[in-house]
Amino acid sequence: QKEVEQNSGPLSVPEGAIASLNCTYSDRGSQSFFWYRQYSGKSPELIMFIYSNGDKEDGRFTAQLNKASQYVSLLIRDSQPSDSATYLCAVDPETGRRALTFGSGTRLQVQP
Amino acid sequence: ETGVTQTPRHLVMGMTNKKSLKCEQHLGHNAMYWYKQSAKKPLELMFVYNFKEQTENNSVPSRFSPECPNSSHLFLHLHTLQPEDSALYLCASSQEDVLRGLSNQPQHFGDGTRLSIL
């Protein structure tokens, strides 16, 4: 079982719709969760992080965390063509001095 | 412009060449990372340096040799690479939270070096 799983997509949504991106993780002790956006040919850019169960909102982005079910999601409201990118979920592998574990990413396409 | 600068942006080398990738972070962070990203594959962690000490080596072949002279600079020395080593190599940095541990903090990435092995 992969440590961090994401649907590779592409996820296609019309402009103005809500895009919902999901991520599941296997390490029950994980405490920190991050969403990165990566445009083609570019490096990952941090857009959200969440540590506690529930929702965290930042502009058009909402991160949702459910530790009991071991999933974290990212909602993008009023999707724009400029949101078209690959979204990477990253999770800390429980306690200890180790780096984040990344999922393979979900490619989002926002259709004008 | 990011706080993490990588050079060169592109590198083409033969299998017998020796080259080095450079990373410099201007964020005052104390941890630095090398990742490999191949097409249609997840980011692969290669090395982690924390306070200039290597804390992780994810079974990386010895043809990749990291060097961290101080907390702001990180190098990846390359020699006798293979065609399958062609990829985007990303450097990242973060600030370690001593109480919570390394992975609690977000990582900030450089723009990467696109490496092609002939």
Image: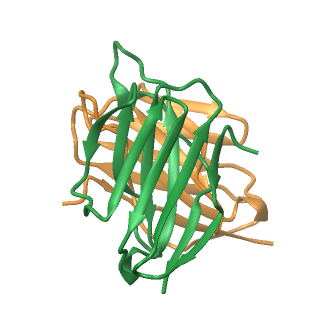
Chain colours: A orange, B green
Query: Looking at the image, which residue is at 38% across and 68% down?
Result: B79
Residue B41 placement (x, y as % from top left): 40, 70
Q: Nearer the viewer, residue B50 or B81?
A: B81
Q: Horizontally, is A2 left or right of B30 in the view?
A: left
Q: In this rendering, is residue B83 above or below B68? A: below
Q: In this rendering, is residue B12 above or below A1? A: below
User: From this viewpoint, is residue A72 visible?
Assistant: no
Query: Looking at the image, which residue is at 35% across and 74% down?
Result: B80
Please identify the quarter of the rendering in which residue A111 is found: bottom right
Residue B105 placement (x, y as % from top left): 46, 28
Please identify the quarter of the rendering in which residue B52 is found: top left
Query: Looking at the image, which residue is at 18% across and 60% down?
Result: A1
Residue B30 placement (x, y as % from top left): 47, 25
Q: Nearer the viewer, residue A98 or B25?
A: B25
Q: Horizontally, is A70 left or right of B51 in the view?
A: left
Query: Looking at the image, which residue is at 42% across and 25% down?
Result: A52
Residue B86 placement (x, y as % from top left): 46, 76
Q: Nearer the viewer, residue B112 or A4?
A: B112
Q: Residue furthest bottom?
A: B118
Q: Residue furthest top?
A: B99
User: From this viewpoint, is residue A33 visible?
Assistant: yes
